[in-house]
Amino acid sequence: MIDWQAIDTVLLDMDGTLLDLHFDSHFWLEHLPRRYVELHQLDEASRRELETRIVGEQGTLDWYSLAYWRRELDVDIVALKREVQHLIGLRGGAMDFLQWLKNAHPRVVLATNADRESLALKLPLTGLEPYLDTIVSSQDVRAAKEDQAFWQALQDREPFDPARTLFIDDNPRVLQSARTFGIRYLLGIRQPNSQRPERTLSEFAALDHFADIYPGNAAPAVKDQPAK
Ligand SMILES: [Mg+2]
C-alpha cells in the first residue's frame, strides 16, 4: 500500500489520528455546552446556541484557540478540559506505529491544529513527544491546516519534499488542503472516534489500522490495542 522507500517525511495529525477523537467530540459538543450554561446560569436555548456556534466555526484558526473560547465564553477552558481528561487517550495501535516509525526513521512531524495549551494538556498524558522529531501547531504559524498558508509556513520551518511525504489526518478538508499543496501520499482515518461508527472517505484512502501500512515483511506481532 505504501512504498516506504519513497518516503522521507511523515506528517501526523494528532486528534482523531494518533489520539481518539472521543475526548474532543465529548468536550466540545457535550461537556463545554453543559458546563457553560451551568457556570453562567443560562437556559437550554443558550446551550443549543453555543453548540450551533461551535459546529459552525469549526476549521478556523480561532476555533482551535483555547484563548479565543476563554475570552468569548468567559470560562476557564483548560480547567473544564481537565474535568474530562480521563477521556484523552491514544487510538488503537498508535503507539506501536510511532515505535515502528522511530525504528524505520523517516522524519516524523506532528502537524496539528491543536494550540499550545491543548498540546500542554495532552502530550504529558499520552507520551507522544519522544516519538516526534518536531511539533508544528497551526497556532505557531498563524494559519489552520485548512489554509494553504499553513503548508507553506510548515515547509519554511521544517523543509520537506511534498513528493516524498506521507500525511495522515482524519479530516477530509485538511487532506484536501494538503493535496492542493502537493503532498503526494495522503491517508485518512476510518474511525477517528472510538464511540462513533466507521465512515468511508470518498476522495482518500482511509486506514483501518496503522499496522495495515507496515511493509509486509515487518508486520508486528503485536495486535492493535483498544483505545483506553
Ligand atoms: Mg484530526
Image (tube, helix red, strand yellow):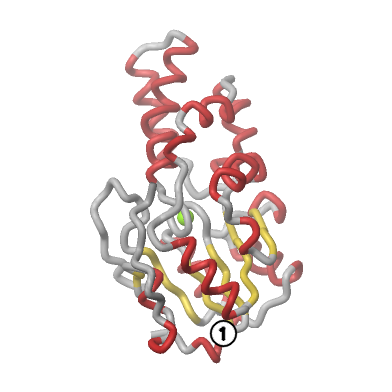
Q: Residue furthest right?
A: 157
Question: Which one is nearer the viewer's eye here, 64 or 118?
Answer: 118
Question: Which one is nearer the viewer's eye here, 19 or 221?
Answer: 221
Identify the residue at image location x=55%, y=74%: 101
Q: Position of residue 136 (x, y in %)?
A: 67, 58
- Bin the neighbour count of mark 1 within 10 Å (Cα to Cα): few under 14, some 14-19, many 20 and up: some
**SS for tag 1?**
loop
Q: Quadrant of residue 50?
A: top left
| Image: 106 above or below 226 | below
Question: Which one is nearer the viewer's eye here, 204 or 225?
Answer: 225
Q: Position of residue 172 (x, y in %)?
A: 41, 63
| Image: 192 above or below 116 | below
Identify the residue at image location x=46%, y=75%: 186
Q: Which residue is mark 1?
A: 7
Q: Quadrant of residue 112?
A: bottom right
Q: Residue furthest top?
A: 41
